[in-house]
Structures are given as C-alpha cells and as structure tokens.
Image (cartoon, coloured by chain):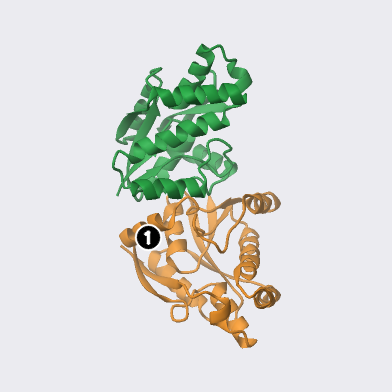
Chain colours: A orange, B green
Amino acid sequence: MRLGLLYSGGKDSTLAALLLAEFYDVTLATAHFGVTDDWKHARATARELDFPFERIELDCDVAREAADRIREDGFPRHGIEHVHRHALEAVAREGFDAVADGTRRDDRVPTVSRAQAQSLEDRHDVDYIAPLSGFGRSAVDDLVDAQLDVTVGPSAKITRADYEAELRALVADDGGAIEEYFPDHEQTHVTGVR
Amino acid sequence: MRLGLLYSGGKDSTLAALLLAEFYDVTLATAHFGVTDDWKHARATARELDFPFERIELDCDVAREAADRIREDGFPRHGIEHVHRHALEAVAREGFDAVADGTRRDDRVPTVSRAQAQSLEDRHDVDYIAPLSGFGRSAVDDLVDAQLDVTVGPSAKITRADYEAELRALVADDGGAIEEYFPDHEQTHVTGVR
C-alpha cells in the first residue's frame, strides 16, 4: 500500500516514517509555498534515510490567509492548522492509499480531530494515519535517542523544512514580530538513522 | 527498551505488537481473572508469533465491581474500562519501561484519555503507548488483511482470551442476559503472521 507522509525533516515525522515503513511503501512529502528553499533540507534527509521524496507546492493564497489569521489572533495555532489541513488535502489528491503526519499525543498544534480525519478519509477515499498520536513526549524522546541522529536548536536557527518556516517568514515580511506570535520552541533536523 | 502490551489474541493487539516490535522488546501480557482458561488462546498465538508471553492475574474484586457496574448501567462500557485501567496498572507494576494496548482511533470501549495516560505514566514512571490510536477502522482492516491470518466470528463463539470473556461469564452467572448488556460484535483470533 502506498502512503504519503507529510514530512518536515524533523524528529517526529522521521520517526513516523520509520514506524510506518514496516507496513507501507512510504513516500516523504514536504508541503511548502515556494517562498524559501528550506524544503531542500527535507529532501536531503529523505535521501539519507533512503525514502522516496515528493515536494508538494501549496497555493500561496493559503499562506496569506494563514498569515492574516495569525496576526489577527496573535497566536499561530489556527493559522498553522489551516495550512496543515490544506497540506493533508494536497497529499491525499496525489493518489496515495493512505496519508499520514507526525502529530504526537501531546502536540497542541497542529491537531487533527477524529471528525476531520473521517472527513478527509471519506472525501478522498484514503486512510488518514497519525502513527505517533498514541505516543507521549517522553516515549518519542526515548525513541529518537535510540534511533536517530539529530541537530537540535531554537526555531530561529534550525528552520523546519516545511510550510511552518515559510509562514514565519511571511508574517515577518508583513511587519509581524515573530517572537510575539510564535512561541520559541526547539526544532530538530534529522541527520541520519542509527 | 522493554514494553508490556495488553494482549487479547485478537487482531488489534496483534497488529500493535508487530508495529512496536520494530522499536521495543515486546512482551505480550494477557490479563485475566482465573475464571476461564481462555487466556491459553493468547499464549498459543504469542508462541506462534514468537513473542514472550506473560499471564497477569487480576484481583477478582475488580471483576465483581465491573460486573455489578455493567448490570447497573445496562451497558458494558464503564465496567470494561474499569477492568482495562486495572489491567494497565498491573502491567505497569511489572517493571516494563513502557506499557501499551491495542485501542484504535474509532474504538468506543475501552478508551484511555490523555489525562488517564499521563496519570499512569507519572505514577509508574513508565510510558503508555497506544500504537493504533492514530489508525482508523479501515486502515486497521487493510493491515490485518495484508499481515495476519485470522479466524473471525461473533463474540459468543470466538471468545477473547483476556478479561472480557470472563466478564461476560460473570455477568451471565449472576443471571444477566449477555446479549442485552454486550452488543454483539465480531471477535478475531489471530492464527498466524503472513
């Protein structure tokens, strides 16, 4: 069965890929808006891990809507979820049997509700799978330590390879204060498998 | 890392075992009350799949409390969840690094809330993992078809190897009408891996 996994090059989506690879033909799919070249980090990691890679270009209107929303809200949650839903839809339209992402049990953003999952599945005749949604933070951390080589740092230095870094860039371009809207959290680049 | 997986011998918990085996040293742990010998089905499947097996005997008071609750409620949900929580606690006390079960995204019974998961983890210094909680029914069915040999039938004929069959027996012994309390759903015995 062919599965398209939304891939950022970070530890969560890489771990999701390893978990699913036992049962599916996994393609790592990085969604972006063509604003920066950060997606190339994800392609490099995908090659290192020997997974097929696809770049999914999203409509720039989605990015603008999300950036507007983030500025209005003063926090990124709804804007990021708006993009995440569009990204899942875009992967689903690629004709995979299943689509997946790396969301964890304790993630606050993005989340995909059971109703949203069911709706995606029904409309695209596809399975939606969140293989890490039954794993808490400490379980994921233990598995990452055991399985992956990673570079860790603050979001400003280690950029995500997917749409999130571009969203930050858009909000900043329009005069938004990034550190005000996006809480500083650590990002990871996976550099290899142990 | 050593992981104890609550195991019924059915398709969900078997699939959970295969998913986790990539990353953990998985022991299949079947919780029961010593009322019937159905746990031996789970041991047989564990041997067939070449996993270590442990039998976890639960306190009979827990079964009686659950049976009482089921008769009072007129439906099995809370009674089964009462036992499931006790079973997870019992596995956690065995000293594993992680405990797991086979609950799916679309399962209505038993469910383990995020708060319950966090509480179990904090009290026992253990990770709780529900590897199938990000998989819907159709994804699980597809994986079962691809990976497992199973015998399927109504609950009355194909008994679960864990506590649920014993709960039914207890409720019936006390004059409860099983078909009234337990909705008839299909059970599976896994007979092998493809």
Dot 1 falls on which chain?
Answer: A
Residue A144 higher or lower than A23, as above or below:
below
Q: Nearer the viewer, residue B49 or A175?
A: A175
Q: Position of residue A49 (x, y in %)?
A: 39, 65
Q: Position of residue B111 (x, y in %)?
A: 53, 40
Quadrant of the image for the C terminus of chain B? top left
Side (left or right) of B155 relative to B25:
right
Residue A37 higher or lower than B6, as above or below:
below
Q: Position of residue B116 (x, y in %)?
A: 48, 45
Residue A180 higher or lower than A55, as above or below:
below
Q: Position of residue A125 (x, y in %)?
A: 66, 49
Q: Nearer the viewer, residue B138 or A10?
A: A10
Write down the quadrant of residue A84 in the picture: bottom right
Give the residue type at disc 1.
Asp
Which residue carries the number 1 mark? A141
Give the crowd class for mark 1: few <14, some 14-19, many >=20 residues within 10 Å: some
Q: Nearer the viewer, residue B54 or B111?
A: B111
Is there any visible trace of residue B138 in the rendered image? Answer: yes
**Residue at position x 57%, y 73% from top?**
A163
**Residue at position x 62%, y 65% from top?**
A81
Side (left or right) of B28 relative to A87:
left
Write down the quadrant of residue B44 in the picture: top left
**Residue at position x 63%, y 68% from top?**
A83
Residue A57 higher or lower than B124, as above or below:
below
**Residue at position x 55%, y 39% from top?**
B141
